[in-house]
Image: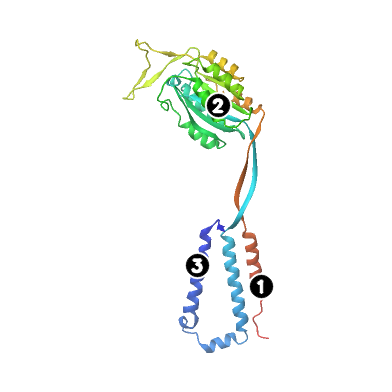
Amino acid sequence: MTFRYISVSLLLIIYLIIWLYWKTSLRRKTFPIYSEKMDLILTKNLDKSKVKFKNSIITLALVLLTIAASGPQIGTRVRPLERRGVDLVIALDTSISMNAEDVTPSRLKKAKLELGRLISNLKGDRISIIVFAGTSHLYLPLTTDYEAALLFLNEIDSNMIPTQGTLLSTAMNTAIETFTDETDKFKVMLLVSDGEDHDDEAIKIATKASDLGLMINTVGVGSKSGSLIPIIDKNKKKTYKRNKKGNLITSILNDSNLKEIATAGKGSYFWFSNSADSYKEIITEIENMEKKTIATHEFSEFEDRYQIIALFSLLCFLFGFLTPTIKK
């Protein structure tokens, strides 16, 4: 048994202190006007055994009322919660080119903003997050805890992966490894990048993922006009990335590469532009997918039992007050 309001049960200690004080001090010794003669006059028509019994019943009623007020909870109540949705893995490019500012405030920040809105609008789907650049890592395992997913998403930056570059294939391989069951549907990947792929395996891996039941959707972030890549040096001064010859590098959205990957992965291509609510098309795509029962969660909680104790308390009060104490 547990108590919802444990502090209320402290009243029992107060009752005990008051009772002991009355028992040892107030009776016969404290009041100077008290005398045995007065006691006989006041109680001559009372049946002392009945008075004692009545006081015991009322005391029991007070104790039960205090216990009821403290919110006793006994056992557990199990309630099944069925979720229907898909398994969604988001792979977010954290390479340095994602700091380009051809979308406001930057490619990476724009992607995080739109993905945050997407996560907030999910209903029953499990979500996982992968971060990648030159290598990839499972950042958040599959979960239905969207609040946790938003916290993890908020902490992502371009310094998370020490190995720079953009290897889209490694992100897809990590996504394939994320799904351990043999279900050949209800799985979808959202590959968010500026498309600057530095290897030739992406199309091949996207086809493999599709064959395994993992749909590959790609999301382009940036513009075809491109942008310089800002770098913050040790003195926190903003400069821009240059090549080995000292020339400034302009990063351009490679949407054709991302579209080819989406086609190979039997998915769709989306674009996070400067317009607001770019995520809505993706939400619509997910909502139109066939859903599965993700899990049958058992939501357990203690069940309140104060009602029975309160009823016994009321009965004791009624019985105590109605019990006659006059001698027959």
Where does label 1 land, which residue?
Answer: 319
Q: CA distance from mark 3 to mark 2?
A: 61 Å
Disc 3 and disc 1: Cα gap in Å? 24 Å
In the picture, measured across the screen, residue 25 lies left or right of residue 322, that is left
Q: At which x and y percent is residue 126?
A: 58, 33
The amino acid sitting under disc 3 is Ile
Residue plotted at (62% across, 76% down): 54
* 2 vs 277: above or below: below
Label 3, on which residue? 13
Up/down of 4 relative to 207, above or below: below
324 relative to 136 in the view: left or right = right
* SS at circle 1: helix
Residue 271 visible in this rendered orientation of the protein: no
Q: Residues within 10 Å of mark 1 (few under 14, many from 20)?
A: some
Furthest residue toward front: 182
Pointer 2 residue:
176
Which corner quadrant holds the C terminus? bottom right
